[in-house]
Image: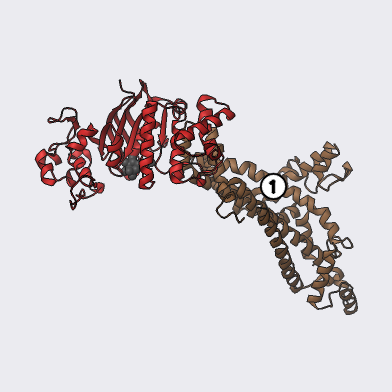
Chain colours: A brown, B red
């Protein structure tokens, strides 16, 4: 198990390296560039040449790449040219990563906490009203664009009803103490509960919008998987022992239905990052997604590189965790023949 | 007095939307009656699809909640099982009624340790605390012949051999000392040598504990070794009921006779041809228009396709019940051997 984990972590390094090369080449092949973005209308051939040299963009691409790698190894990912010009990309990452993580974790928690029970109940009452509603609902959930849903939620619950704030992560006036950069956590640690609650209120609408796709997918996969397991012989055996429905559900049905669901959750973290770009834009939520959107418009190479690479790293790590959780769920994998893993 | 009295048990499956399509509902079990006395082993024998499992599942209350209609009666120690609520039935299953299934691998939960699969039934019905239940579970595994039972408690089904798994399932079914055990083809998925061991184990356990056993099988060899009384099922109905010795010595229903002639016997002369029953269950005609076995029956006469035969005491052997217009005679049996 340990060897397997180490091997997977080494793989992660290679994945990130390979991705960095691809990204590097791709970003530089985009039309426009940081120089045009920075100078805009005022561009002259001289100012362009000067800034290009200043940013090191006049050198051959592989030289640029190796310089980037060298600096990255010591934690220097360059200076932002567009998102927050002058700030280091690393500082932007440290500032914004916790925001998106808070948002994504809340979104996936909502998706799991509501999606799995709903999928289970739909399967149990197959063909019933709840089942049909969940099938149709999850289809709509996947089909409605996140951007649109975010916009509607904001209009209805923030603008019209005023139940939630419309934008941002926290009211500036609260002057909350920063410890970890996770605002909810900070509020709890420092016992500034009003600050924590305010941060939660800022998270709710974007998290709901962001959870729509993972939620719908989790409902569908759980439902299908539970239906499969309900037909299994061991569920009949459990019934023949006279066990209570509760025990049968928990111990015999749900546990066996979880493998495909867990796999789905891992894959959905990718969709989550894509959704974060749109959601954060609608709610002007200062996270990675928003920085990516701005960084892309302004061709902020250092910020784009660091943020996309870290997003990819998170995705790979989450899926490693998923693979490891298989062994926890299924003893056939844990004690599988050969024991090579 | 009988422990279990099954009377006129019928199970009809309705496919979805049968009213619209005008599709006839299928009677998988069609008026089955039999008794099981305490300590007695009763066989239900017949070929695939004749309704053996459905009979067992309806007694256990394990049929799907929707899509079927169960009528008739199944009285267990005076209580009508078919009219018990889901909760009352749950209280009985695993405690008064145990069941062993055909495929031991798929019948055990792959992600739950064997120990817990045994102890959960003790906890459920006897409120045995975890620790003590684990000890009892080890004893149970030991009793069904699983070596090193303590270590097995924490193992998973895939770590056991097929025979071990079936032993574990038997231990689970017998954990709360049920008064009735239903074994639905418990050896079909095992190799021949293991089959014999499992059958011997079942025989020993029911003898020691006085458990009544319903043995479901399509294998007359199993019947020969285990059952006191045998019910032969065809297309959802019992066609012949006899004591084991009587049945083997002189099968009367042509279907039973066919079943017996189609299995190899150790004591039969070498070179003797096995006689398979011609046709298959697909040739069934419903019992409403005569005997369902008639199209495949070597003894069929005109009456067979006109009048549905009733279950009646065999005119020749009074201990036997028979559903046949033209039973196999001694001369016919001679002619075949
Ligand atoms: N859930 C169900 N829905 C519809 N028909 C069913 C259902 N379960 C069983 N049947 C039908 O009932 C009939 C009897 O099935 P049953 O499983 O009792 O046969 P069996 O005698 O146990 O055969 P086998 O030896 O193959 O186990 C079959 O024709 C089968 O198709
Ligand atoms: Mg069967």
Q: Is residue B58 visible?
A: no
Horizontal arrangement in the rendering, residue A139 relative to residue B12 (left or right): right
Q: Give the residue displayed 53% in from the left and 40% down from the top.
A: B152
Q: Is residue B276 visible?
A: yes
Q: Chain of mark 1?
A: A
Residue B289, quarter of the rendered image: top left
Residue B96 point in image, percent of width and height: 42, 26
Counting every numbered tag in the picture gives 1
Residue B325, quarter of the rendered image: top left
Is B50 in front, or is A31? B50
Horizontal arrangement in the rendering, residue A48 relative to residue B331 (left or right): right
Is B143 in front, or is B154? B143
Considering the image in quadrants, where does the C terminus of chain A appear?
Answer: bottom right
| Ligand 2, image quadrant it occupies | top left
Horizontal arrangement in the rendering, residue B25 relative to residue B270 (left or right): right
Residue A92 point in image, percent of width and height: 84, 57
């Amino acid at each position: 198990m340990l060897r397997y984990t180490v091997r997977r972590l080494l793989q992660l390094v290679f994945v990130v390296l390979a991705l960095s090369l691809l990204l590097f080449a791709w970003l530089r092949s985009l039309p426009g560039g940081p120089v045009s973005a920075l100078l805009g209308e005022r561009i002259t051939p001289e100012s362009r040449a000067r800034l290009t040299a200043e940013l090191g963009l006049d050198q051959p691409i592989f030289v640029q790449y190796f310089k980037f790698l060298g600096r990255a190894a010591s934690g220097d990912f360059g200076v932002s040219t567009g998102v927050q010009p002058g700030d280091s990309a690393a500082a932007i990452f440290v500032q914004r990563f916790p925001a998106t993580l808070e948002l994504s974790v809340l979104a996936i928690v909502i998706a799991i906490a509501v999606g799995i029970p709903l999928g289970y109940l739909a399967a149990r009452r197959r063909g019933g009203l709840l089942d049909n509603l969940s099938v149709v609902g999850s289809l709509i959930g996947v089909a409605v664009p996140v951007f649109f849903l975010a916009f509607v939620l904001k209009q209805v619950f923030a603008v019209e009803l005023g139940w939630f704030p419309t934008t941002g992560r926290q009211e500036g006036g609260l002057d909350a103490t920063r410890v970890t950069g996770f605002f909810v956590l900070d509020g709890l640690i420092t016992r500034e509960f009003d600050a924590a609650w305010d941060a939660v209120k800022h998270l709710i609408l974007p998290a709901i919008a962001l959870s729509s796709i993972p939620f719908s997918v989790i409902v569908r996969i759980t439902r299908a998987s539970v239906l499969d397991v309900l037909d299994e012989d061991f569920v009949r055996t459990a019934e023949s022992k006279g066990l209570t429905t509760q025990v049968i559900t928990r111990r015999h049905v749900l546990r066996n239905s979880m493998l495909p669901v867990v796999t789905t959750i891992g894959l959905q973290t990718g969709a989550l990052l894509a959704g974060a770009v749109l959601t954060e834009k609608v709610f002007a939520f200062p996270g990675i997604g928003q920085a990516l959107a701005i960084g892309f418009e302004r061709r902020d190479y250092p910020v784009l590189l660091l943020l996309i690479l870290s997003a990819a790293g998170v995705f790979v790590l989450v899926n490693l965790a998923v693979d490891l959780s298989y062994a926890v769920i299924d003893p056939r994998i844990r004690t599988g023949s050969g024991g090579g893993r | 007095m009988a422990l279990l009295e099954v009377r006129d048990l019928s199970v009809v499956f309705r496919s979805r939307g049968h009213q619209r399509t005008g599709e006839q509902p299928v009677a998988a079990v069609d008026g089955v009656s039999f008794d099981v006395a305490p300590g007695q082993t009763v066989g239900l024998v017949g070929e695939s699809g004749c309704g053996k499992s459905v009979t067992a599942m309806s007694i256990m209350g394990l049929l799907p909640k929707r899509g079927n209609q169960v009528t008739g009666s199944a009285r267990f120690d005076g209580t009508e099982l078919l009219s018990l609520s889901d909760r009352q039935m749950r209280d009985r299953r695993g405690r008064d009624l145990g069941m062993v299934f055909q495929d031991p691998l798929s019948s055990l939960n792959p992600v739950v340790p064997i120990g817990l699969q045994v102890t959960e039934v003790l906890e459920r019905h006897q409120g045995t605390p975890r620790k003590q239940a684990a000890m009892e579970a080890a004893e149970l595994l030991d009793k069904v012949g699983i070596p090193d039972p303590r270590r097995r408690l924490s193992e998973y089904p895939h770590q056991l051999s097929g025979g071990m798994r079936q032993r574990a399932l038997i231990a689970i079914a017998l954990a709360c000392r049920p008064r009735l055990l239903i074994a639905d083809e418990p050896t079909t998925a095992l190799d021949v040598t293991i089959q014999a061991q499992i059958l011997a184990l079942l025989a020993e356990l029911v003898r020691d504990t006085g458990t009544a056993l319903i043995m479901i099988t399509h294998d007359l060899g199993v019947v020969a070794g285990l059952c006191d009384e045998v019910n032969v099922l065809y297309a959802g109905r019992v066609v012949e009921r006899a004591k084991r010795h009587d049945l083997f010595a002189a099968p009367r229903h042509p279907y039973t006779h066919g079943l017996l002639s189609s299995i190899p016997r150790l004591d039969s002369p070498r070179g003797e041809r096995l006689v398979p029953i011609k046709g298959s269950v697909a040739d069934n005609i419903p019992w409403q228009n005569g005997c369902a076995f008639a199209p495949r029956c070597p003894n069929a006469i005109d009456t067979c396709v006109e009048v549905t035969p009733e279950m009646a005491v065999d005119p020749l052997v009074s201990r036997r019940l028979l559903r046949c217009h033209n039973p196999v005679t001694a001369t016919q049996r001679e002619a075949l051997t």
